């Protein structure tokens, strides 16, 4: 019964794949917990410094740092954060689609773009899609350090300081929960003032030492913290998406095995019935 043997071979192959996807699901679940811990540790600081810098941008300061000043946009930088590996559902595809749409809006306004790519998937995509890639960071691992990202941030900030860039955005996946991750486009420069209405009256901070030295350090740390937070959020999204994808693959493999098992039983039963019919026909002929 060659048909039954062929089906049985497919069943064994799918069972082997199912073992792999189940193991990957368990590994991703373990990594996701660690990634969430790192994300939750750094998120309060990133949110607090974002709020403080928003207040600084809202103030009526005597000294206006270049990062707070809005100027005519001729060239924009995009930091695009993806994963190094695949098998995480539509996580990277959705993010890259969001990034391309945001870039298209700038292209339509005749604004040139510089790209800084984090993650191997972004590098592979934009090598095919095209774009002026000025910096890349790949293979950061599951627990990246902020020192791994300072280099690419420095390249973009130096371009902004030299007025080679007029604005800077970061595109990354925001972790909502295990089942939901949302692509986000966040403007880093120029810094967007807070929208809190109660801060609309005339006021300013008292700086010690002078405002320039303090804001030079503070605003640079702010950009670095936002980039780092985007990367750790994206890693948590990656592990959650991969865990869900591997669970779906495991479940689908189980359903396929069940379907093939029924087909195998039918093929085997048909073969046995045919053999019995041949035996009965042979006996009747004798």
Image (cartoon, rainbow, N blue to C red):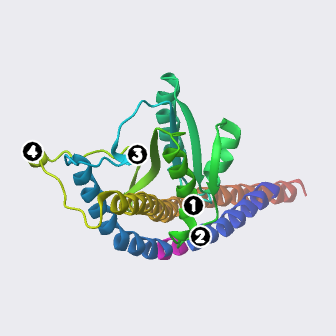
Asked if residue 28 lies in the magenta stretch, the reply is yes
* Camera-nearest label, 4 or 3: 4
> In what quadrant of the picture does the N terminus appear?
bottom right
Q: Earlier in the sequence, mark 2 or mark 4?
A: 2
Give the CA distance from mark 2 to mark 3: 27 Å
Q: Earlier in the sequence, mark 1 or mark 4?
A: 4
Q: Which residue is mark 1?
A: 258
Give the CA distance from mark 1 to mark 4: 69 Å
Q: Are marks 1 and 2 in contact (CB under 8 Å)?
A: no
Q: Which residue is mark 3?
A: 189
Give the CA distance from mark 4 to mark 3: 24 Å
Asked if residue 58 lies in the magenta stretch, the reply is no
In the figure, residue 22 lies in which quadrant? bottom right
Q: Which residue is mark 4?
A: 201
Where is residue 24? Give x, y as percent.
58, 70
Identify which residue is drawn at 8% across, 48% down: 198
Q: Which residues are magenta?
A: 24-30
* Camera-nearest label, 2 or 4: 4
| Badge 3 density bin: few <14, some 14–19, many ≥20, Cα 10 Å | many
- Point out which mark residue 274 bears: none
Secondary structure of the magenta portion, mostly? Answer: helix
Give the CA distance from mark 2 to mark 4: 46 Å
Q: Earlier in the sequence, mark 1 or mark 3?
A: 3
Where is residue 233? Give x, y as percent.
43, 62
Identify which residue is drawn at 25% across, 59% down: 52
| Badge 2 density bin: few <14, some 14–19, many ≥20, Cα 10 Å | few
* Camera-nearest label, 2 or 3: 3
* Camera-nearest label, 1 or 3: 3
């Amino acid at each position: 019964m060659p048909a039954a043997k062929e089906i049985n071979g497919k069943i064994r192959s799918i069972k082997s794949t199912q073992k792999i996807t189940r193991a990957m699901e368990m590994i991703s679940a373990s990594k996701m917990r660690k990634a969430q811990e790192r994300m939750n540790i750094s998120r309060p600081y990133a949110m607090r410094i974002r709020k403080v810098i928003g207040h600084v941008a809202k103030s009526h300061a005597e000294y206006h740092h270049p990062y707070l000043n809005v100027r005519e946009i001729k060239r924009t930088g995009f930091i695009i954060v993806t994963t190094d590996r695949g098998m995480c559902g539509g996580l990277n595809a959705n993010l890259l689609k969001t990034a391309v749409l945001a870039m298209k809006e700038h292209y339509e306004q005749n604004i040139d773009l510089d790209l800084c790519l984090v993650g191997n998937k972004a590098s592979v995509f934009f090598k095919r899609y095209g774009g002026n890639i000025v910096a890349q960071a790949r293979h950061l691992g599951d627990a990246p350090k902020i020192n791994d990202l300072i280099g690419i941030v420095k390249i973009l900030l130096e371009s902004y300081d030299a007025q080679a860039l007029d604005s800077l955005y970061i595109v990354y996946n925001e972790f909502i929960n295990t089942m939901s991750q949302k692509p986000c486009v966040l403007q880093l420069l120029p810094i967007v003032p807070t929208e809190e209405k109660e801060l609309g009256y005339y006021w300013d901070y008292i700086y010690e030492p002078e405002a320039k030295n303090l804001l030079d350090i503070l605003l640079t740390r702010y950009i670095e913290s936002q980039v780092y937070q985007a990367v750790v959020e994206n890693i948590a999204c990656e592990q959650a998406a991969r865990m869900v994808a591997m669970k779906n693959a495991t479940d689908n493999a189980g359903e396929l095995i069940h379907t093939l098992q029924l087909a195998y039983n039918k093929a085997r039963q048909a073969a046995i019935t045919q053999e019995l019919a041949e035996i009965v026909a042979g006996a009747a002929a004798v």
